[in-house]
Image (cartoon, rainbow, N blue to C red):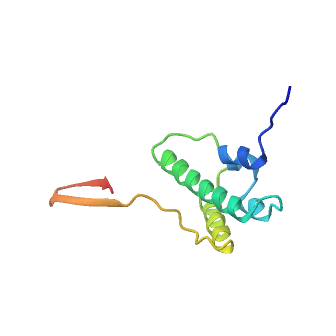
Amino acid sequence: MEVRTESRFEQAKQDVSRIFASPVELCDAPDRSTDEKVYLLKQWETDLRLLLVASEENMPGTHPDVRFGADTAACRAGLVALGAGGLVPTPAIVITCCDSTSCKGNVA
């Protein structure tokens, strides 16, 4: 019977911070292609943003070692170095004011 093991890339797609200690380590990984590194860095930055939102809403995460600012900056720097820009698209918040006393935010 053949036992199939997931590649390191497939494992990283599930939780990149469990496979690589930092975005810099990911960028330096000789066994990953540029496309794989870009994919994983974007995923890492998205994960960081989601963890940040959760922490702001008092929902503790399962990653106590997360350094939001440093890791986000490292993801962006890695993406720039790889020629992929460095900005992950995020939903725009549109503020709609009905009158001077009430405003509500809508995700566009």
Pick whichever, 92 or 40, lies toward us: 40
Q: Quadrant of residue 98?
A: bottom left
Q: Quadrant of residue 84?
A: bottom right
Q: Is residue 96 left or right of residue 61?
A: left
Residue that lies at the very extreme toward the top in this rendered image: 1
Residue that lies at the very extreme toward the right in this rendered image: 1
The answer to whether residue 59 is above or below residue 102 is: above
- Whether residue 29 can be seen here: yes
Q: Is residue 87 left or right of residue 83?
A: left
Pick whichever, 10 or 91, lies toward us: 10
Question: What's the residue at 86%, 25% (across, down)?
Answer: 1
- Whether residue 64 can be seen here: no
Location of residue 90 in the rendering, given as x and y in whole percent from the top left corner: 45, 59
Q: Is residue 63 left or right of residue 105?
A: right
Residue that lies at the very extreme toward the front in this rendered image: 1
Question: What's the residue at 48%, 49% (across, down)?
Answer: 53
